[in-house]
Image (spheres, coloured by chain):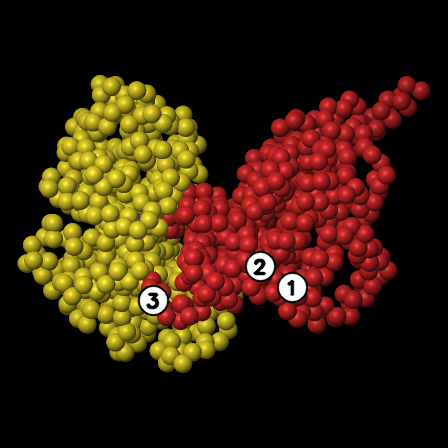
Amino acid sequence: MSITESDVKERPACTTTSLSNYRWSDPPDENKWADCVHCGMCLESCPTYELTGQEQHSPRGRVHLIKSVAEGKLQVNEQFMDPVFACLDCRACTTACPADVDVGGLIEEARGQIRQAMPLTGYKKAVSKLFLESLFPHQQRMNALGRLLKFYQKSGMQKVVRKSGLLKVMPDHLADMERILPDIKEPVRKKYKGEKVINAKGETKHEVALLTGCVMDVMFSDINEATINVLTRNGNDVVIPETQTCCGALHVHAGEREMGRNLAKQNIEAFKDAEKIIVNAAGCGCMMKEYAELFREEPEWQAKAQDFSAKVEDISKYLHDTGYEKPQAEMKTRITYHDACHLAHGQGVREEPRNLLLDIPGVKMVHMPDAERCCGSAGIYNLTNPEMAGEVLKSKMKNVPEEVEMISMGNPGCMLQMAMGVQKYGRNQKVVHTVQLLDWAYQKEDELRGERDGIKRSQNK
Amino acid sequence: MALKEVKTNDKHIRNLANIVGGARSILYHKEDLLAYDCDGFTIHKHLPKAVVFPKDTQEVSKLVKYCSDNHLPFLARGAGTGLSGGAIPVNGEVIISLVRMKRLLHVDFENRRAMVEPGFVNLKLTNSISDKGYYYAPDPSSQYCCTIGGNVAENAGGAHCLKYGVTTNHILGLEVVLPNGKIIEIGKNGIPDSPGYDLLGLITGSEGTLGIVTKITVRILKNPEAKQTVLAYFDNVSDGSRAVSDIISAGIVPAALEMMDKTAIEAVEAAAFPVGHPRDIEALLLIEVDGISAGINEQISQILHVCENRNVREVKVAKDESERARWWANRKTGFGAMGAISPDYLVQDGVIPRSRLPEVLSRINKISEESGLRIANIFHAGDGNLHPLVLFDARIPGQTEKALAAGSACLQVCADVGGTITGEHGVGIEKREEMRFVFTDEEIKAQTDIREVFNPDNLLNAGKLFPSPGRCAEIKKEMKEAAL
Ligand SMILES: Cc1cc2nc3c(=O)[nH]c(=O)nc-3n(C[C@H](O)[C@H](O)[C@H](O)COP(=O)(O)OP(=O)(O)OC[C@H]3O[C@@H](n4cnc5c(N)ncnc54)[C@H](O)[C@@H]3O)c2cc1C
Ligand code: SF4
Ligand code: SF4
């Protein structure tokens, strides 16, 4: 395409050396799009292309537009923002692409530029500030929010609200979310505060550090609890570094890369003594494995980030690699497994969690077609793009087999989204984290053993 | 997501939007249109006037009629994976995208046929019927995402077309919207060989210049009872190419017989689906035989024997389905894999008599040396369908032109040895001039006369398929502008 006169006029005089319309530091990386040969092999993997059929909403289209801005053919404006922000960040295209184009990285870098070119205003700014700046990075405030939610549930207010019809006046997606609020329990970071190490049961084989996560520890502290149980049962001493913080994934997805960098630095420091960093939230794990990407312009931190990332491991992969005790008790349940995008596409972890589940006696695994398809959660996408997220969820739910009792997965965001799907489409599956199932199997085994021992003891009397 | 309202002073855009039901089904902002400025052939780029997304044949017909009545150039687009620029809007066309017409309408196992809408993706057909033991044979490497409508337009081939034939051998019926908006049905009820002219054959492979295909009835096949796949590594290209001829001469008709050279192997091994091929071999063959179980093993041992006679370094049979699948994924993503070793590539598509393979490959090698550009070869060796991939970097001034010249020289070689300039990717805008390598002016005129009948105003996908002096000048000008 030729460059029009208006393009030339709009271009500021200071950029005579480059045609690029990216005017801030940390712009999309030319080497990343240079890998793209425009073959289109990624099209069908992309949920937003599947729904719209429009190429600006496809990986190939997004890469092409991002490149076009650098070539001076496009401006960073509202119209460019639409396809870039409608991306789910699901990384399915990364799996599909033969040339290994890092579409996700390009999208996030482009979002960084957009946020600087067009800072948020009004309501959106307030919401973003509230969540990203004032809430997620602050443990105390998250805990307070947890207490508030707990109060909301325990006090009977939840019942009142649900009866009152107040939900009807909330925007649809918020009302949907309210309906699936999990039971709020005590965060593990609070519970184990002051304990230097949570000791392995029996002989210590390894020492690991646990990322408790910001949302995870408030909404799903029982999953953190289960993770600690499973780790200690398998010979791991667990430490929970005090100064750790939110992983920054949501910030980076939202284009707030500077905030992301600050959080990354804090975590790199917090975990600097750890040998292994165990994560049970795929989204956080994926982000933490990609910290180096944030520091392209700070080589010193980039090196630190690389060392840090090499130590990050998803819980299921860690158990698979280091070995774990096979549970003995029968669970007798039919389950299906959903591949969280940031586990399957982001970290290449697919078989490990499935094998873990299959190792539990009595678990029958039913195949979910297109298990690797995004559920539409994608960080806070379901808050920012509710319409597209809803459509993606709809097609996901169609693939959940009718006959299963549970849907297992490795990411809290997906769990909320899938729970919403179950609720919305009148299904009756329980949504669980893989590590919870393993923990339950261990617990059941202990109970049975306890009973058996009890019987033995009473017989011996 | 897309704006809910169409806001523009252009009355054509507003009217087109009304036909397809509003803002969600039309794109007209420059930012969105840029995603449509080329297809899998990236050397020419041009913005369309608009992109519209009809949901059924009626809407296609109305769109076409509107364009025709108002003298707006238009063209059809599927997944945009075409490699010869067939879907590039060189005249600022209105693009009619068929991707939302993607239903599988009907499967008739008894009569072994299926009816699909044009936007239905090739591989999805096999995936939808494989549990019943059936499949759709034409398997272009782009089958993960290209549409069957696009396959009909390009008469697409694939690895398994050696034994089973290309798209045209599998089309039983078509519904077509003609350039005046009228809807016709060819091959009624999916019964081929109807009396009169062979319109099915004419439309298939016409590269979207005669009409827009809106329904397709295809033949489906029963899965072969047995299948075996062999991988053979050679230390020199001519041994590999001779083995290809020997296999066919031995009377074996492999389902597929594919070849990759050293540069191609370097790319696929550096990309997303490596299988661990040795990097120092000069050529590999991927050979598949299928059919009834009896006799398969014998064919395999014959193939192994041939390879050994031709000094194969290593040859092995796939242990199981998963190994076979990995070999194929590695092969089928070969073009895209070029991205791992080069920023841009231009793929050519010549066909030659199989026996001339060693000679042609060495001449291509020479073209590579002379142009200073690397050329990788991944191709359907069994039917002599070459795919030289010219690797270049469009950011370096002059390289694009060099690549085009090298590509054209490869086609000249194919024509010289009695072959032709395209096996399956079509002529598009890329090989218009090269049509002169194989057709006289009279022969070309006979074909453009046929186009006149269907497409008298030449509003539908003009400037494709045939060399036309006027147009050529225009394209050259465009290239100059683009290079600026
Ligand atoms: C990585 C890669 C590998 C490939 N491998 C092969 C291969 O092995 N064999 C092979 O044959 N090709 C191959 N191709 C080329 C390409 O995929 C095929 O030509 C395919 O048939 C194009 O389909 P599409 O849906 O992408 O069509 P598009 O690219 O969108 O369109 C191609 C042409 O068809 C016309 N068209 C599209 N839909 C219609 C319709 N409904 N009615 C009328 N005209 C229409 C368009 O106007 C255009 O001229 C490959 C391409 C890539 C990128
Ligand atoms: S991102 Fe990868 S798969 Fe998609 S068009 Fe580019 S090279 Fe092809
Ligand atoms: S990350 Fe997901 S939504 Fe975004 S372009 Fe890739 S496949 Fe599409």
Dots 2, 1 in contact, CB < 8 A? yes
Chain A: its colour in the image is red
Q: Earlier in the sequence, mark 2 or mark 1?
A: 1
Callout 2 environment at 10 Å: few (<14), some (14 to 19), or many (20+)? many
Chain B: its colour in the image is yellow
- Viewer-nearest of labels 3 and 1? 3
Disc 1 residue type (three-letter):
His
- The residue that disc 1 covers is A173
Some atom of ligand 1 lies within 8 Å of the CB belonging to the residue at label 3: no
Q: Looking at the picture, do discs 3 and 2 lie on one chain?
A: no
Say if residue A159 shows up in the picture: yes
Front residue of this view, candidates B460 and B165: B460
- The residue that disc 3 covers is B48
Inter-mark Cα distance, 3 to 2: 30 Å
The residue lying at 16 percent from left, 59 percent from top is B466
The residue lying at 84 percent from left, 29 percent from top is A451
Q: Secondary structure at mark 3?
A: loop
